[in-house]
Image (spheres, rainbow, N blue to C red):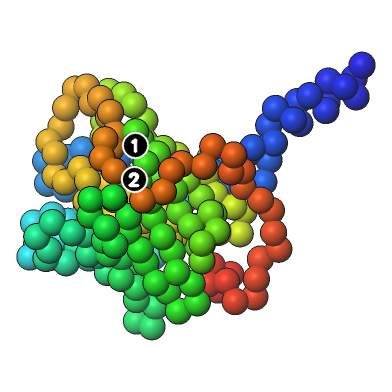
Amino acid sequence: MILALINFCVSRNKTFSFAMIIDIYQKKLSLGDKYKVFINDILTYVVSKQPLQLKPEILVMGADNNMLKIRIVKCLQWIKAKYVISFSESQIYTFKTVSYFRSHFQCITKDAVYDIYRHRGRKCSIYKDHDQIAWWQKDLITWLEGDTYRITSNENADIDLLISFCLILDNYTSGNKGEDVLTINLGYMGLQAKRFNKEWVPNRQKLSSTDRSTNN
């Protein structure tokens, strides 16, 4: 009986048993938004957005030492998204729109191609070299605060890139909205380049020696 109960509990939680869970909480301010980023319930990063610049910046700082970890710069574009993600002087990548009408975005690093797809509603998926590695969902309702996101990813995924993608799309789709008592997020209503995969679950893999995240 006890063994059956344990097996039932394991099966109920198998979707998240090997997952990295990233929660991003936004605080809307009049002169730039703030974010707190939790990785598996541990406060890891604090984020500030500097909107009053020719090229607005998003700065991701370590929560424990306030050191700059990621710099995201918005490039001047008319409709399509274009952002530069900097981890160091030698690790600079561009996030850009592939299809505006189907809400498909891409970021090419030195060793992989990341495709980011928005789905109808409040979900978004991330693929690395055509294989899904993560997805996130925005909360439907927020009170007195900004948007809230939860990212579910493979255990060995590049967490910093996933966080960057989420912050970029929040900036691109939400802009500089003011403070609201109540926010209702109905999500994306347009065409899709790829449907959301309801069957996907995160996996657990040994970290590769070439993984950028192992060098941080």
Label placed on residue 120 = 1
Q: Is residue 30 left or right of residue 13?
A: left
Can you see residue 108?
yes
Mark 2 → mark 1, Cα distance in angstroms: 7 Å
Determine which quarter of the picture holds residue 150: top left
Position of 82 relative to 47 (above/below): below
Q: Quadrant of the N terminus?
A: top right
Q: Position of residue 161 (x, y in %)?
A: 43, 61
Label 1 sits on a secondary structure element that is: loop
Mark 1: give few (<14), some (14-19) or many (20+) Cα within 10 Å.
some
Closer to us: 212 or 68: 212
Can you see residue 43?
no
Nearer the observer: mark 2 or 1; the answer is 2
Position of 205 relative to 184 (above/below): below
Residue of label 2: 192
Q: Which one is earlier in the sequence, the residue at label 2 or at label 1?
A: 1
Q: Is residue 39 left or right of residue 184?
A: right
| Callout 1 amino acid | Arg
Q: Position of residue 130 (x, y in %)?
A: 51, 62
| Callout 2 amino acid | Gln
